[in-house]
Amino acid sequence: MSQVYTTQELIQILADERRACLRGQRLKLEVTVSGNPVIDQFIKTDGLQKFTAYQDFKAAIHKYQREYKVSGIVWKTINVKGKTLDYPAVDSQLITLPSDLETLKNAKQSILNFWYDVTTDMDLYLSINNSKQYQSIQLIEVERIAQRTEWSSLWKWENSQFLEIILQLGWGKAESAAYKRDFPTSGSEYVHAVNPGNTPIG
């Protein structure tokens, strides 16, 4: 049997293919904007052809993942206020296998504990309206959301004057949860912690 690609190799293959598509080396020529040849001759379709070519390739990689049970999990490290956490997350270009979902669920509490620890005395905001607005939220409300969700993830934005730590509380498949593509089967809520007097930017 030939060697099965690893998670990291699939991530690299997708990155290479994405670059090739963006350079126009891969096009799905049969894709048109309207389907009407008279109209389409006046509209640039190469962007859509590049995007579709990449999406088709990505779908083939996802099929490969399912067939050969190649995890979509990558391990990340976050450092905040002198504290460090290693945690699992699904790569943005890969899918969640059932075993990946279990890994995410098992890491939820350690991620929450870290977030609670490093966000003490910070202002909390819930992302609403597809992250176009933020609503002030109390810790007790975050805890209620956490009880209803299956897994969590983290990001931070930081410079010398600003710190924002984002807690994603999700359910269902991680690749669908971020954009609520399969809502309500998959979805997520985002809680932003910022220093007092600041507002979220992420």
Image (tube, rainbow, N blue to C red):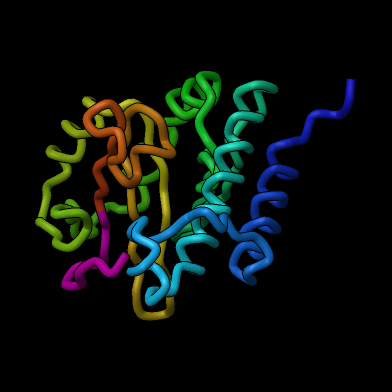
Q: Position of residue 5 (x, y in %)?
A: 77, 35
Seen at 24% across and 66% down, the residue is: 200
Seen at 22% across and 29% down, the residue is: 184
Q: Position of residue 9 (x, y in %)?
A: 75, 44
Image quarter for residue 39? bottom left
In the rendered image of this protein, does residue 15 appear above or below residue 93?
Answer: below
Q: Residue furthest bottom?
A: 161
Q: Main secondary structure of the magenta part?
A: loop
- Residue 196 is inside the magenta segment: yes
- Highlighted magenta segment, given as a residue range: 192-202
- Residue 190 is inside the magenta segment: no
Q: Residue furthest right?
A: 1
Q: Residue furthest front?
A: 38
Quadrant position of the N terminus in the picture: top right
Q: Is residue 166 left or right of residue 96?
A: left
Q: Position of residue 183 (x, y in %)?
A: 24, 33
Q: Nearer the viewer, residue 100 or 186?
A: 186
